[in-house]
Image (tube, rainbow, N blue to C red):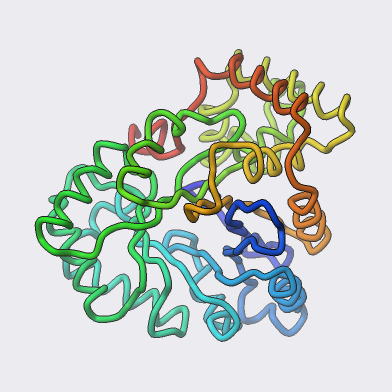
Amino acid sequence: MIGLNTHQTQSTAFDAVVTMLCSVLITTIVHSVHVDIPSTEQLPIWRSHNLKFSLLQANNVKTIDTARIYLSSEERLGQVKASSRFAIDTKHPGGFAPEANSQESISSIANQSLNYLQTDQVDVYYIHAPDRRFPLEELLAGVNALYQAGKFKRFGLSNYLATEVDEVVRVCREKGYVLPTVYQGNYSAVARRMETELLPTLRKHNIAFNAYSPIAGGFLTKDVEVLISGGEGRWDPTTMLGGLYHALYNKKNMLEGLRLWDKISKESGIPKVELAYRWVAHNSVLKGELGDGVIFGTRTIEQLNQTLAGFAKGPLDSEIVAQIEQVWKIVEVDAPLDNFNDSISKQ
């Protein structure tokens, strides 16, 4: 899921983002899910969320992941008592809301999240993005106070640069604060800069990596001609989210790589979306034994079934993996690190 989420509020909107820890056997994969629930008024006429919850549980889904900036996601998860069936992860806005990063604001926002979620404690509490205009020490003091109060079990970071992760760890160690043990970052077959720019630092500090946007915001499912003509839906360039996606991915080398991606899909008979998910989960640098995971999204029960079935098929053939390496060589020069550092933080 991208850092800037624009969930719809219609009864048809139900984004489930599932974090799956990479593992050789599908039965040992641990799952975490982000779910957008319809409003209270819509619940009597739209109950498919309960079917999705049951399907996720049947596939060993353990956790629901959300964030304060995901509009009313936390409130709706509370309305359907999601915390009674799943562990919950959420995120403090951090750099997405610079005015909210004083120690007092951190406490207020966290308690608001817990109130919305109708739970006393979440599993992972992330800082969604770095706030480079605010003292890091005060932010971390606020996070540690929440930890000491039992508001969360594990501390996570998202969209931080490697040098910033080092600094967070340094301050936490010096102050005796809770250390970060989980990181959510952008990673896909066409966005692999984290392999060299971030992952070595995370490994050094024993921080697990959860990859968001494994289909590059949907880029790896698109047709080149559609993008050249402007795009539609989430890729409508006249919208904030669509404009962000085009700025990150609608580039000459990215489009050339997408053409090869389409060719690989057609020749192998594997759908483009399945190629993307299986590569990240089974053929990338992620390691399940180190707690790494993949975040994926789905809107319908049919899509959820298809995605889970795709993961269960396991690793791609070596010939296909070699072709995907060629895609990376084509796009590497234009590839983004993540949505926050390559676009949002520069606005």
Number of numbered discs on residues: 0
**207 is higher (above) or lower (below) than 282:** below
**112 is higher (above) or lower (below) than 186:** below
**82 is higher (above) or lower (below) than 310:** below
Q: Position of residue 291 (x, y in %)?
A: 49, 56
Depth order, front residue of 201/40? 201
Left or right: 202 in relation to 37: left
Quick one: quadrant of the C terminus?
top left
Q: Position of residue 113 (x, y in %)?
A: 39, 74
Q: Residue at x 47, y 52 (%)?
A: 290
Depth order, front residue of 314/252? 314
Q: Residue at x 35, y 76 (%)?
A: 112
Left or right: 97 in relation to 85: left
Q: Residue at x 69, y 31 (%)?
A: 231
Can you tell which quarter of the image residue 125 is in? bottom left
Q: Position of residue 335 (x, y in %)?
A: 51, 24
Q: Position of residue 268 (x, y in %)?
A: 87, 29
Q: Residue at x 52, y 64 (%)?
A: 65
Depth order, front residue of 30/124? 30
